[in-house]
Amino acid sequence: MKERAVPAPRQPSSFVALLAGAAFALVLAGCAVQTPRLLAEPPADLPRRVELAETPFFPQEEFQCGPAALATALSAAGLPTRPDDVADQVFLPVREGSLQLEMLAGSRRRGAVATRIPGTLEAVMRETAAGHPVVVLQNLGLSWIPRWHYAVVIGYDLDEGAFVLRSGTTERLQLAMRTFEHTWDRSERWAFVALPPGRLPTSASEEEVTRALVAFERNAPPSAAARGYLAALARWPGSLVLAMGLGNARYAAGDLSGAEQAFREAAARHGSAAALNNHARVLIELGRRDEARQVAQQAVRLGGPLHDTALATLRAVDE
Amino acid sequence: MKRLQRLFSMLLVICFANATMFQVAQAALVTTEQVAGIASASGRDASPHERLSALMARSDVQNELERLGLTPELAKERIAALTDEEASMLAQQIENAPAGGSDVLGVIVFVFLVLLITDILGFTKVFPFTRSAR
């Protein structure tokens, strides 16, 4: 609750945290501290220093670090947003805070793809180096007296051994990497980037990017979702889910020939019943009934959980 | 706690029952969520969300939500923004949740709030929210 507790975790608490962390490590044997290793041998391709200085700053109002952090990240992604614009979507009055899930959902509703990134300091650095501010959840308190806080990492300095953040009421908070790591560790290293569709995080896994895009498709204009799938598919061409997403998003956007192409390619590459079924459906709408029948028959032959769906599609060919 | 669990499983059963019916009726495009296996059973697409919307139409639930500082419209929008995977992840956590209310209304609102507000960290006692500068 004290003002200084937000921007600057102090030495004593980080010392206690160190002890707590050590005890925790003994139990779980999995809490490697990354900072010393990273400072001793930083990856050669990382710049020594990064600061996304043009990232906007919204000093948070009471309890509203979630909306403030989200507005910061969205504005930096080219979607001008004020904390008030998102407070309704992510702030929960009774809890006096914002939930992680709703931070992701709130980004999507504003038109950004929110993708979780790996819980490593290196991933955070790589994203900032790529020009992507990173929204992080920190626990500035201790595990048994949590003081949750959202902030935005906008850069780092390897020589100083510090991260630079937009945090709370502090426009430029320089936080020692070690301290940052401890406060972040206690949130299970939760972090995400909010980017315009079509732009991919540099560090995120195929799984997380896919998850983010599928969620985005639910809320976003179909053409924007298609843009996102197309970019991801360029990086992971072997993904059935991404290929299906591209087809579905194009279909929803009214781009029938684009959808036909996406489903045709997905079906050829993966031989998937879902792709065949959707391909047949689009062919029906395009009036290419003979092709549709063939494709639907293929889908029916594959059987599996989509057998009934494929059968209905086959019947629809001649309706 | 027992009662709460029972009620919630009933809710789930209704959701699943709906889903099966929808599966027969809907035969258009297979959704991306289905392909991703994110909706763990195929065809379970809209029903959890529809179920929640129906609950929210109840006036006593609305009153309770308003007391908590959420308008029904906002709650509806916020639920719609979650994927089925997110929704079911939240739903799973309810078993570990502390008993929220002893009456039916309390339980409904509790289920709601869990769907709305719990997060991946776990429901035990810790929500990721800030207690910030005053």
Image (cartoon, grey):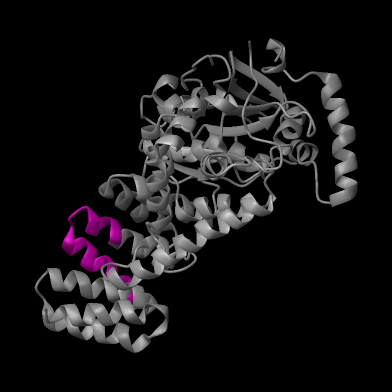
Picture coordinates of residue A277 (x, y %)?
28, 75
Position of A126 relative to B17 (above/below): above
Q: Position of residue A132 (x, y in %)?
A: 49, 35
Specify the quadrant of the image occupied by residue A84.
top left
Q: Which residue is rendered at x = 38% and y = 46% of the image?
A: B53
Q: B82 and A159: which one is in front? A: B82
Relative side of B84 to A293, left or right: right
Horizontally, residue B100 falls left or right of residue B27, namely: right
Residue B46 lies in the magenta stretch: no
Q: Looking at the picture, tell me which residue is in the foreground, A84 or A207.
A: A84
Could you say where residue A76 lies in the image, as x and y percent from the top left? 43, 27
Which residue is most to the bottom? A301
Q: Is residue B120 above or below residue A237?
A: above
Q: Give B67 or A12, whichever is nearer the viewer.
A: B67
Q: Is residue A255 magenta?
A: yes
* Res B65 visible: yes
Residue at horizontal 54 percent and vertical 16 percent from the top: A60
Q: Would you say A70 lies left or right of A40 here?
A: left
The residue depicted at 76 percent of the width and 28 percent of the height is A179
Q: Answer above or below: position of A124 versus A70.
A: below
Residue B15 vs residue A144, the one in the foreground: B15
Q: Quadrant of residue B2?
A: bottom right
B123 left or right, relative to A294: right
Magenta segment: A248-267
Residue located 29% across and 86% down the image: A298
